[in-house]
């Protein structure tokens, strides 16, 4: 995740469905509040849909 005002979990944390993991923000070069979500496996970007419920 990028551009968050606050991250509430860290890499390796287990989270439950519905658990708050971050607070959206507009850090860096972002022009407005938004969520940047990307899943990397072995350093390569992959489609995250199969990993989400």
Image: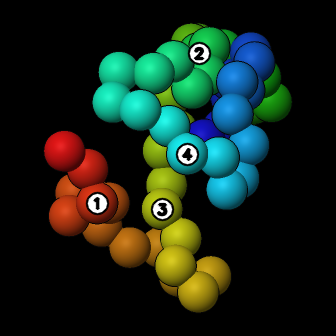
Front residue of this view, candidates 23 and 2: 23
Answer few, some or many: residues within 10 Å of disc 2's Cα (few below 14, many 20 plus, some between 14 and 19).
Answer: some
Mark closest to the chain's N terminus, 2 or 4: 4
Q: Mark 1 — residue?
A: 51
Distance between the alpha carbons at the discs numbered 3 and 1: 9 Å
Nearest to viewer (mark 4 / mark 1) = 4
Nearest to viewer (mark 1 / mark 2) = 1
Front residue of this view, candidates 11 and 35: 11
In the picture, measured across the screen, residue 5 lies left or right of residue 19, that is right
Mark closest to the chain's N terminus, 4 or 1: 4
Answer few, some or many: residues within 10 Å of disc 4's Cα (few below 14, many 20 plus, some between 14 and 19).
Answer: few
Q: Which mark is residue 24?
A: 2
Asked whether the residues under the numbered discs 3 and 1 touch, taking CB atoms below 8 Å apart as contact, a structural biologist would say yes
Mark closest to the chain's N terminus, 2 or 3: 2
Nearest to viewer (mark 4 / mark 3) = 4
Distance between the alpha carbons at the discs numbered 4 and 3: 16 Å
Q: Secondary structure at mark 4?
A: loop
Q: Mark 3 — residue?
A: 39
Quick one: quadrant of the N terminus? top right
Residue at (65%, 46%) from the top-left corner? 13
Q: Mark 4 — residue?
A: 14
Residue at (59%, 86%) from the top-left corner? 42
Quick one: quadrant of the C terminus? top left
Asked whether the residues under the numbered discs 4 and 1 touch, taking CB atoms below 8 Å apart as contact, a structural biologist would say no
């Amino acid at each position: 995740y990028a551009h968050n005002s606050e991250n509430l979990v860290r890499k390796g944390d287990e989270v439950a469905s519905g658990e708050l993991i971050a607070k959206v923000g507009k850090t860096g070069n972002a022009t407005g509040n938004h969520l940047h979500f990307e899943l990397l496996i072995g350093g390569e970007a992959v489609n995250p849909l199969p990993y989400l419920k």
